[in-house]
Image: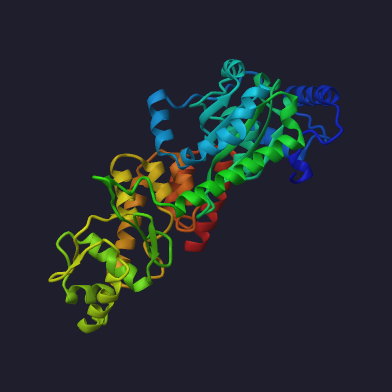
Amino acid sequence: MGRLNDLAMPPGADPAALSRYLNLAHDAFVSTGREDPSLRRLVLESWQRSIDGGLDPEQALAAIRLDDDTLSDIRDSHPLAAGMPVIRRLLVEGAADAGLLVAVSDAAGQLLWVEGNASLRTRAEGMHFLPGADWSEASAGTNAPGTALALDRPVQIFGPEHLARQVTPWSCSAAPIHDPDTGAILGVLDLTGGDEVATPQSLTLVRATVAAVEAELRIERLSPRRGTQVSVGGWTRPSLEVLGGHGATLRHGTTTTRLSLRHSEILLLLTESADGLTTAELGVGLSEDEQAQVTVRAELSRLRGSLGPIELASRPYRVMSPVDTDIAGVRADLDTGLLRRAVGRYRGPVLPASTAPAIEQLRDELHMHVRSYLLASDDADALLSFADTSHGRDDFEVWERILAILPPGSPRHAQVAGHVARLDRELG
């Protein structure tokens, strides 16, 4: 059920009486700035952040930042697209029958999907609660999706706890969704409607759905990748996954093989080489000590036993069957402008445990490739998703880029500014 402060309407509370009290407290704050000490601290702090950021409580409407084409592109490439079937099955179907809405945002607070009761969707559009709108606190003031994103925790907002006047008839429960591998915030799941949405049961339902989505994303990562496996004439092309893991995972057909670190290094180098590699070239790529050619040959012989239908030719050594890699997937997404999907695929460095010179070079090249696209981008969602990961958390330039994009006065801007200052001290 979460911490007590997460709950907007504790068990046994009278919704009508609570609404009257909150309306009075809201009016006093808006007209005089007086803070009622009985209000939840979470709400008061959010109200103050919104006011400090220049939000007008009487006139504010969430900004609509994404046109239809841009929204469609983002949906197609966003990591949370894989979780939407789970959300629809567990939450949307019941919400539509109950007269409620379900919304999913990205990490920057932009609503990507708003589904549920049709008549309620039409009403909600009047306050710009629709796909493409920015419901971060800086844009829409205190609200469950934006405040959950700002605090990285589940949040309920009941009626007049919203700061923007046009949103006060509504209530909402929301919780962040995290990447199962990196822990980065991918977005927020929100349930919106009337008083009933502010009950403990509603927040429990949202949190349970988030847990199911994160589990689904984890399962999908462990399953053959739709984006990297290609069927040719009824035959499924093998795929090799080398990002973020100790060793590589090789998939062919229904078979999944976990390769040793040395075999992972060899197979990756061969898939990256268009013309193949000699024993001597592999030796140099695998070790600065230039391993004895007989040792490399022995490893190649053992590797053949793990490759299944993949043919490994010699003189020079080369992979005869096409093999897709997650590295190639990241590169392709970057080159086609699918930055969010590229960041989602880039779950960690190339074979991080490897000290092979050629692997270290591949690792550095891919990382710099991703960074260069991010630093040239205005996509706050992709930048935040990267920066929240272990391989982006200490990247000063990326955090500086985020700071330049986020609206001044927003809670994320303040958090990022603090992180940039800390990194500056540590690096300086």
Give left or right: position of 62 versus 302.
right
Give residue 421's position: percent from left, percent from top. 53, 53
Color encoding of the figure = rainbow
Give residue 258's position: percent from left, percent from top. 40, 66
Can I make out residue 279 in this image? yes
Give residue 266's position: percent from left, percent from top. 28, 69
In the image, 270 versus 411, the foreground residue is: 270
Residue that protrudes farthest toward the left in the picture: 315
Can I make out residue 417 in this image? no
Q: Residue at x 56, y 18 (%)?
A: 125
Res 161 quadrant in image: top right
Q: Residue at x 41, y 42 (%)?
A: 340
Res 147 quadrant in image: top right
Give residue 396's position: percent from left, percent from top. 45, 54
Give left or right: position of 255 versus 285.
right
In the image, 399 versus 253, the foreground residue is: 253
Location of residue 184 with respect to 129 vertically, above or below: below
Q: How many marks?
A: 0
Q: Residue at x 64, y 27 (%)?
A: 95
Give left or right: position of 254 versus 307.
right
Give left or right: position of 291 versus 330.
left
Question: Quick one: quadrant of the N terminus?
Answer: top right
